[in-house]
Amino acid sequence: MSEPVKLYVYDLSNGIARQMSLQLTGRQINGIWHTSIVVFGKEVFYGQGIDITAPGQSHHGNPLHIIDLGTTALDEETFNEYLEEMREHYTADKYHLLDFNCNSFTNDCAAFLTGGSIPDFIKDLPSDFLSTPFGAALRPTIDAMYRRPGAMPPPFPTPATATSSAGPNPELTASILQAVAAQAQQGMLPTTAPAAPLQATDSLVAPFHSVTNSASLKTLLRTHKAVVVNFSDMITCPPCRVIAPVYEQIAHEKGVKTSGGAGAAFAKIDLSTSSGKALGAEWSVRVMPTFIFFLDGQKISEMKGADANELRNQIDLLLFQAYPPHPHTSLSLPAMQTLSLNPILFTQVPALDTAANKLVSFVDSAQWPAVATQTQAEVKQALSTTILPYLKSRSNTRPSSASPMLLSIWAKTTFTLAQALPLESLFPLLDMWRLAILDSSVATWFTASVQSSPNTSPLVIFLTKVTSVTNAPRAYLLTLLRLLSNAFSSPVLAPQLLLGQIRALMTAVLIPTLLHEDASVRTASASLVFNAAAFLQKGRVDAVKNGGGSGKRDIEDEDWEIEISSAVVEAIDREKSNEDVVHRLAACLGCLLRLSPFYESQMSSLLEVLQVQSILRAKLAKGGCGDNGVSKKDVKKLVEEIADKLCP
């Protein structure tokens, strides 16, 4: 008779992750998940070893979610025997908040009982968190909580460096982490002595998968294109200990999460345990360490011994087979390769008092709406006592960062002014935000506002005010484009500009302004579209460097990139006088084309239909851009390279 298997899901942060994750990481994280398996009338979980209690009676309280994992045909005695074997593997000293935790255990149990796995949103949480700039900044703190004595810290930025772009209070975050870790590892019985430092691998970002039985290995092979499995015994095998740091470093460099999805899944099987020995026997492992390489669920090769160079070569070969390199990787593209992918920023500081006085004059002369949430006096007070002092402080040797309270006041004032003032009177306000968004704490806050409260986010408000680019005031358009360009200075905010509603709104302004009659507007628009394309290009280049092929990342969108490419080509064709605009547009087109995951399926045919090669070559001829065509040497080389090597 089959027995139902349930997954109980708890939030170790008690709601804090849902409330604060957007501001802290730039990504919505709904919980720090702890899970347990409920089967045969008992709840089983991993913390201080393996604990068993009545369902819902653990120290975690009531589950937030109960997920049906299916049924098992195994009997209770067989499951109990499995748990006894797992006790030597899932011990208290091996627990790690991110790398080897309760979810590793429940995933193994799910595979053993049902042949399935726990949901991806739970399994992938550690890698998703650590892939954010803020998560990377917290890695040393988590590392310090679990690193075994004498372990060398992994080669990542120091907390001070990493947190500079994240903004939040590190002491607050560390205390939250400590509380979550304590709750995660708390056992059913109180301890009378402080726990010893917990073991962990040296590299916490490495996407290792726990594999303790045949079912969990089969699940891993079924759900990942490329898999590397390390069979070793760290206790009795010196070569295993020698190669372990190398394996971990490669896993960090070429793991699925760190390569934009085009990497391998890395697993470790402990041959010192009975379950590990059974897996070793199943795969005929007789030498330690042994590495087995899988492609599409099938074993393709294995390596015995601790040769670091050979291990790297074998993994590179596996990834080459799994993700064939993009055809552009074989091209010589010196102009594209030397092109700076840093965003074009507009950092000039205006006379702030003059800008503020101009905005105040607009407030004084406005017919104030009755529905406004602030009076004119309150708006002017916010400008003079909160916003202006902050902007002036940004020019100091050690500029101050914006506080959440300041940003809340400023956002409220922005909402009021957007209701009260006509479009032509808002450009001083946009210009203030243009400067502020270069502050990483402001950019992080913008990210949260775009995701959690889009209707009141200043970026969304400013974009939705433009109902017609043709009729919009030049000063407003110019400043808005510069503000959006500066938004790409933040690695947290930049991805959000290329997703969902905000991308659609930005595109509606961007495409028409590429053809605007005013040269300054066209220059700002070309800068913005280059920043967007350069951000995509940087991700593609990083993926190739880390072993990925031409795989598509989540942020890539075929329809949008075709639409933007078509608009850029038309803008290049029409631009007859401004060489700087041609330069930025050509660089943008090169970034959109090079290493594009859609190049062979759509882009190549689009280029032929639009006759892009001829359009680019025309820019080099007399009258194509100025009297004599493009004159700057570096621009010429770039245009020629794109026309001759990236266009069919």
Image: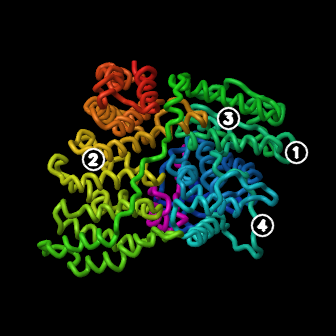
**Classed neighbour count for the residue bearing mark 4: other residues with Cα under 10 Å, few (<14), some (14–19), many (≥20):** few
What residue type is disc 4 on? Ala
At x 61%, y 29%, the residue is 319
- Pointer 4 and pointer 3: residues touching (CB < 8 Å)? no
Q: Quadrant of the N terminus?
A: top right
Question: Which mark, residue 236?
Answer: 1
Q: Position of residue 327 (x, y in %)?
A: 51, 22
Is 302 part of what is drawn in magenta? no
Task: Name which residue lies at 38% across and 37% down.
Answer: 557
Q: Examine the rendered structure and indicate whether residue 615 appears above or below residue 455.
A: above
Alpha-carbon distance for marks 1 and 4?
Answer: 23 Å
Q: Amino acid at mark 2?
A: Val
- Label 4: which secondary element: loop
Label 2 to label 4, Cα distance in Å? 62 Å
Seen at 84% across and 32% down, the residue is: 287
Number of other residues with Cα within 10 Å of mark 1, as a class: few under 14, some 14 to 19, many 20 or more: few
Q: Which residue, given by chain and number where applicable, does mark 4 sit on?
A: 196
